[in-house]
Image (tube, rainbow, N blue to C red):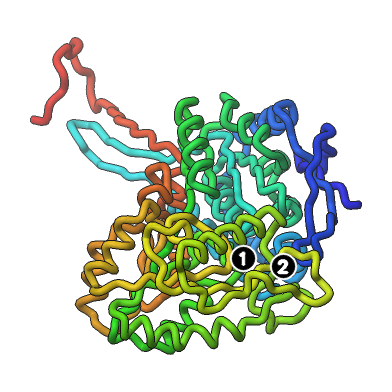
Amino acid sequence: MEQIGHWIDGAKVAGSGRTADVFNPSTGEIQAKVALAGKAELDRAVEVAAAAQPAWEATNPQRRARVLMKFVDLLNRDMDKLAEALSREHGKTLPDAKGDVQRGLEVVEFCIGAPHHLKGEFTDSAGPGIDMYSMRQALGVTAGITPFNFPAMIPMWMFAPAIASGNAFILKPSERDPSVPMMLVKLLEEAGLPKGILQVVNGDKEAVDAILDNDVIQSVGFVGSTPIAAYIYERASANGKRAQCFGGAKNHMIIMPDADMDQAADALVGAGYGAAGERCMAISVAVPVGDDTADRLIAKLAPRVEALKVGPYTSGEDVDFGPVVTAAAKQNILGLIQSGKDAGAEAVVDGSEMSVQGYEDGFFVGPVLFDRVTPDMDIYTKEIFGPVLSCVRAKDYEEALGLAMDHEYGNGTAIFTRDGDAARDFAKRVNVGMVGVNVPIPVPLAYHTFGGWKKSMFGDLNQHGPDAFKFYTRTKTVTARWPSGIKEGGEFSIPVME
């Protein structure tokens, strides 16, 4: 049985005794034990980080960027190894696992531009003999708490800009799939990152609370459910930390009567069922405008959903999606599916009771397509995080727009239409952070920022893009005066422009 510890001060460290099981979601078998850190282990990692960080911050930002350049090379070299380890613990298909690594890699590439992103501003002769300039300085020791569904991408979204800015970073990944984060830190040190600048502390709530209460840690990033995001944001903020916490989602896709129904159906199948729906940017609600549109959409969707191939990642690249991450997740999804049936939703496709031959103990849930879902049903209000797509029929555009706007989550949304005026109006008015126009999963590229609105995000700055360098640095403004001659006496009134 593999024992997964922590990575502290450039070496693997065994745990202090508490462990959690790491499952193979395809078989249901325990494949490893991961250590769960307590306060002492977290404090030790912080002590190491605080000692290593000043020298790293003093390193020329271009030299820091060169470490990330080498890291990108190593990520590409080990792509297959990373993807296989990711799929084995998470359950997603190999192509999807490689995409997980790739989207993180792209943020690392953006962070190679740190020498430019960290430049300050300068004003010459702001007053007589006075110059003003600003500089961006690292926070010090920072931390991130990342979810199971993207064990490569989201850690890189956090630690790449943090260390590029001169910080040390402590990563607390999900205990459900901890192997890839451990592999990433080893690759970064192989690329030349000094020991102690990136460390991995595995754990559960005890480790999370130790991070939130540690006085040395200056900022905390989090991605997960909304209740936990709110908890972390409130506790971190109360302790004087900068916090960036991303929560749940219920992403709507509006389908206008003029949309290409084949294009819309293909988009919905990929966005709704990819990665078994375990994505915060998954489309979980289709909103066709008008009954005719809905009927045409369902006619296109049903055979596509029925044809989806579900199986373990080892069954080949033609598998569309694999199992969900745990038995508990499976039971929660099945409970919500049953609640939809009980509430009167029409199960057009019901794969909830499917079983994969040879993998009967795996955590598989087949695809489910509901029609005639109403906004009062649990399957509409709650984030299911599974392969379930709900169709909510809207009588007109304004009702469709209102559904997206009235929901408590505001992570992502999309509209499919050929009408530029409708698309422009939707993008302008909808109160959601990321909007797609004929794009089903509108995740911005690395040089733009990622973030939701409403209860999908707590904090003021988004992930990656320019906001990342703002989040991981403080701005210091200097007013400097070098008198050209001797000035008699002191001035006791506030200086003003002349």
Query: Disc 2 versus disc 1: distance between alpha carbons?
Result: 8 Å
On-image quarter of the C terminus:
top left
What residue is rendered at 37% in x and 51% in y? 408
Secondary structure beneath label 1: helix
Disc 2 crowd rating (10 Å Cα; few below 14, some 14-19, many 20+) is many
Amino acid under disc 2: Ala
Secondary structure beneath label 2: helix
Residue 444 in the figure: left or right of residue 91: left
Closest to the observer, 342 or 331 = 342
One can see residue 66 in this view: no
Closest to the observer, 136 or 338 = 338
Residue 140 in the figure: left or right of residue 423: right
Lower position in the chain sequence, tag 2 or tag 1: 2
One can see residue 8 in this view: yes
The circle drawn on residue 100 is: 1
Amino acid under disc 1: Asp
Counting from the top left corner in percent of width and height, residue 467 is at: 41, 50
Disc 1 crowd rating (10 Å Cα; few below 14, some 14-19, many 20+) is many
What residue does disc 2 label? 83
What residue is rendered at 70% in x and 56% in y? 326
Closest to the observer, 244 or 138 = 244
CB under 8 Å between discs 2 and 1? yes
Instruction: Farthest residue to the right: give it.
Output: 1
What residue is rendered at 69% in x and 59% in y? 325
**Vertical position of residue 325 compared to residue 218: above or below:** below
Counting from the top left corner in percent of width and height, residue 116 is at: 44, 54
**Vertical position of residue 250 compared to residue 239: above or below:** below
